[in-house]
Image (tube, rainbow, N blue to C red):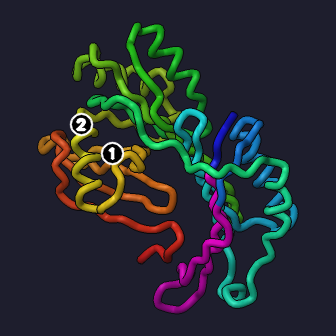
Amino acid sequence: MNVAQINIIDVYFGVNEEKGIHEIGRDIRFSAVYEVDIDIQQLESKLIDEIMQKKGDGIKVEINSFENNHYVDVYLLLGEEQEDDKFNIDFILEFLQQFQRHDLKINKYNEKNYDKFIYARYAPGDYEDISNFLQEEGIEFQLLSKTRNTFERGASDFWEGFLIAMGQSASWDLVKMTASKIKNRYNGSFRSIEVACLDVGKLRENLADLAVVDQQDLRLISFFEIDNDQETYEVHFRTIHEKFDVQSNKSGTILKFDRYDIREVVAD
């Protein structure tokens, strides 16, 4: 059984000479947790089809998955004239009635801490390809999170990202070599592939202190390397309604961080 935190958010766009088309406002219209008895990709596909039929294009769906727990953020992309005259989302709520409302929140983070990671982002992707390759190489690993991002407005775009933790027995050199082999084997499929040697446990603890949040609510999404010589990374966490972009060294010391609420306007 999948548990999904579903957030439906209006995003309003305006136009002027200085900024062109730009975001001017947001409004969270609905937020609830559901027990979902179908595959989360089926939910995504059916939800997008339902919205496209009733609304037309102008939709972004981002799903962050942690085993059977999922954050599903549905952004309805609208014109500024609809900021006062709200778009009717009753048909979306009716669609969701086929699933059972859940009184609990998404499970808190309770995994053991790892310190070596691979993050692969590609489109279209299949995690089974990477999983099978790692098994062939005899490498212990765990899929920590998966991200799916779909955009429908004029042209369509879709990508998937997989955050993989490597077992303690895997050396740093082995992790780097493995990432290189994956990239070469599936050359042309990847948008990016990153490796990190990082004390995420300490980083999560430091971020929780600075941001004043429960560290068990901070779910690790992705990362990329900023400076190889300095061994610094930008690491991405999220909670139910907030996302954090954190610059850190390998020991988990925070150099700077930005936080933003998915319900609020994204600054230019």
Q: Amino acid at mark 2?
A: Leu
Highlighted range, magenta: 5-31
Numbered circle sitting on residue 202: none
Q: Quadrant of residue 209?
A: bottom left
Q: Quadrant of residue 260?
A: bottom left
Mark 1 = which residue? 224
How far across and down, in percent of the image, does residue 77 sit?
66, 71
Tell me which residue sits at (66%, 58%) in the image.
32
How far across and down, in percent of the image, does residue 56 sit?
81, 67
| Distance between mark 2 and mark 1 Cα atoms | 11 Å
Mark 2 = which residue? 198
Q: Quadrant of residue 91?
A: bottom right
Question: Which structural element holds mark 1?
Answer: strand
Residue 142 falls left or right of residue 172: right
Is 23 colored magenta in this rendering?
yes
Q: Amino acid at mark 1?
A: Phe
Tell me which residue sits at (26%, 39%) in the image.
201
How far across and down, in percent of the image, does residue 78 sit?
68, 77
Tell me which residue sits at (34%, 58%) in the image.
213
